Amino acid sequence: MLIRSIMVSLKCPVCGGEVQVDDNALPGEIVEHDCGAQLEVYSDHGRLSLRLAEQIGEDWGE
Amino acid sequence: MILGVSYDLLRWEERNLIDEAKKSGNKVIPLFTKDITFLSSEDASYQEIEAIIQRNTSHSRASATSMLFETYGFKVFNDSLTLNRCENKLLTTFLLRSRGVPVPRTAIAFSRERALEIAGKLGYPVVIKPIEGSWGRMVARAQDEDTLRSLIEYQEFTTLQYKTIFYVQEYVNKPDRDIRIFVIGDEAPVGIYRENSKNWKTNTALGAVAKPLKIDEELRELALKVKEVIGGFFLGIDVFEDKERGYLVGEVNGVPEYKNTVRVNQFNVSGFLLNKLTEVIKK
C-alpha cells in the first residue's frame, strides 16, 4: 500500500514565512526553515504548530 | 505490545523506533516529555502501556521521567537506576572497577590541590572530564600540571552540578579509534569503531567516522559483564583498546544513539530492540 503523506502549511515564528510540515509529524520533530531558523513541532491544543527549537542543554547527550 | 516512547526531541532513532514498532504490529503511544505532567492525586494516563522505552536527550528529563513512570508501575527501559549509573561517570567507573571490569586508571578528588597531586601520580598526559556530560563536551587533555590547573579552574567557574568534584583519568594511548558496542537485552549483537585521526576524542558528534565492528568473544563477554554490573536493557558501551592491557571500558550510555551503527552495519537496531522487549514483556 502506498502511503501518501499530506503536507500542512505552518507559519515560521521567526520570519513569518510559510513552512511545509508533514501532517504525520510528531511533537519534538525538528524542522529547518529557509530563513535559517531551527524549529520544533509542538501541539498547540491538538493543532500542529512551530516554535523555536530548544538549544543544546548542558545535560544533553546519550 | 502497547509501547510508550518517552522522548523530548524526535531524532532519527526515535522516529525509526516508532516506525519499526508500528510496522511490526505494535501500538505506539508517543510520550513527548514537554507535554507530560504528573499529578500525585491522580493515576497516570495510558494505563494500557506495557513497556516504555526511555529516549529523552536531556539526562535530567530521562532520569526524572523513568523514575516517575516507575512509581506508577510502568516497566521502563532503561530504568532510572541504570540511567543514573550511566550518567554519573564517577559511579560508572567505580562500580565497574569494584566488579573487576577493566577501566582506565581514574582518580577522583574534591579539591584543586588533591586533584593536581593525584594527577601527578597518574602521570601526564591526563584527561579531565565532567562527572556528567556527553558528546565529549568539556572533556579535555592536559599535557602538564600547568594546563590541568587551568582546566580545573575553568571547571570550578562553570555552573556544573559537580563542579567541585574532579574526575581525572589517564590518557589511554589508543589507536585513532575507540569502540562502541551495544547490549540489547541479553545480547551484544552489534557495534562500531569510531575513527578519528584528527582528534583524540572519538565521539561521532565530534566528527569521528563509524566503521563496522568485529565483535570477538572477549569483547562480547566484556559488554555483557558491563550490563550485569550497570543493569538496564539497552546500553551503548565505549571501549578503549590499550596495547598492553587490552580492552578498557570508558563510558556506558543509557540512551544511546545508533543511526551510524545501523547505517554502516545494515543492522536493524530498533527491530532487534523491539523483538527483545517483546520477549521480556511476554515472560
Image (cartoon, grey):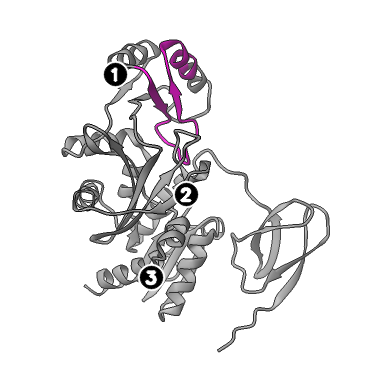
Mark 2 lies on a secondary structure that is: helix
Q: In this view, does B243 lie to the left or right of B137?
A: left
Residue located beneath label 3 in the image: B271
**Image coordinates for residue B102, horizontal then vertical, percent:** 21, 37
**Is the Cβ of the residue at disc 3 closer than 8 Å to that at disc 1?**
no
Residue at 40 percent across and 71 percent down: it is B3
Foreground label between 2 and 3? 3
| B132 is higher (above) or lower (below) than A34 | above
Query: Upstream in the sequence, badge 2 or badge 3?
Result: 2
Evaluate whether residue B83 shows in this view: no
Q: Residues within 10 Å of mark 1 (few under 14, many from 20)?
A: some
Whole-angstrom CA distance, mark 1 to mark 2, is 35 Å
Residue at mark 2 = B61
Residue B280 at x, y percent in the picture: 25, 69
Residue B188 found in image quarter:
bottom left
- The residue that mark 1 highlights is B122
Q: Is residue B221 left or right of residue B197?
A: left
Q: What residue type is labelled 2?
A: Arg
Q: What chain is tagged by disc 1?
A: B
Q: Which of marks 3 and 1 is nearer the N terminus?
A: 1
How far apart, in angstroms, are the residues tagged by discs 3 and 1? 43 Å
* Three-letter code, disc 1: Leu
Magenta range: B124-152
Query: Residue B62 location, x and y as percent?
Result: 44, 51
Labels 2 and 3 share a subunit? yes
The residue lying furthest to the right in this view is A16
Give the side of residue B141 with respect to residue A34, left or right.
left
Residue type beneath disc 3 = Gly
The disc numbered 3 marks a residue on which chain? B
Image coordinates of residue A22 in percent, x first then y, are 67, 72
Give the CA distance from mark 2 to mark 3: 25 Å
Q: Can residue B14 be seen from the camera position used here?
A: yes
